[in-house]
Amino acid sequence: GNPETPKQISHVYNYFVFFSLIIYLILALYTSELFSIISDSVYEKGSTVVVFLVPSILFSQMYVFCPGLSIARKTFIIFLINFCGCVVNTVLNYFLIREFSIEGAGIATLISSLVVFITFYLFSQKYYNIQFDWHKIIVVWSLTILIIILSSLYTSDSYFVTQLSKIMVFPIFIVACLYLKLINIKDLISIKD
């Protein structure tokens, strides 16, 4: 294979993380508004699990950036990882739903998706090593989680102030990603073209 391919996969992964986290921030920060538009008030309690389910979906799809097991045709290992993920999810659901209700199910799904992704990554690296920018990616994920937590704790009587604070999150997030060199402006301009 092309020796540049692992570097290209890592580069594309950075942009996947960047755009995915922007979508995650939109969904997490505007969950109540979105739920009021698209669903009945009966489902409003379900909005509390969005912050857990969106990253779960992301983690469950990130395996495509770790092609080692597929390249090596290790289908039984892939099966075992996914089966263990199901077991972890079931056990966590049993305990967390009893304690935290629907949020417990979301937390269980998030944890099991993360465990599956990390396991998949570690095994895949043995067969096809890709040097990801983990320190940058972890910092950006941490920033995203911090923004969501602070947003959930922040309250204002003013609708305008609340919306303005949500909107200001996005330029701050983008500048942080540029500063960390997770992404660069030239690539963003070339995507636009």
Image (spheres, rainbow, N blue to C red):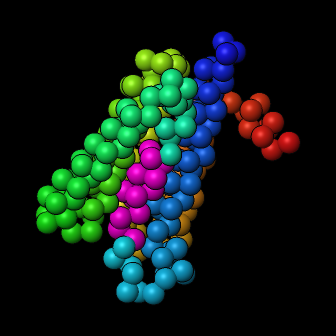
State whether residue 23 appears in this view.
yes
In the picture, the quarter occupied by the N terminus is top right
Q: Could you say where residue 118 lies in the image, as x and y percent from the top left?
A: 37, 33
Residue at 50% in and 45% down: 61
Is residue 62 toward the left or the right of residue 51 in the image? right
- Please name the predominant secondary structure of the magenta segment in the image: helix
Closest to the observer, 158 or 40: 40
Q: Is residue 145 above or below residue 100?
A: above
State whether residue 136 appears in this view.
no
Quadrant location of residue 104?
bottom left
Closest to the observer, 46 or 170: 46
Q: Could you say where residue 158 lies in the image, as x and y percent from the top left?
A: 46, 73
In the picture, the quarter occupied by the C terminus is top right
Q: Could you say where residue 5 lies in the image, as x and y percent from the top left?
A: 66, 20
Q: Is residue 39 above or below residue 179?
A: below
Residue at 64% in and 32% down: 12
Is residue 108 toward the left or the right of residue 39 in the image? left
Residue at 44% in and 40% down: 141
Closest to the observer, 117 or 41: 117
Q: Could you say where residue 179 lies in the image, as x and y percent from the top left?
A: 58, 29
Is residue 59 inside the magenta stretch? yes
Q: Is residue 4 above or below residue 52?
A: above
Residue numbers of the magenta segment: 47-60
Is residue 46 inside the magenta stretch? no
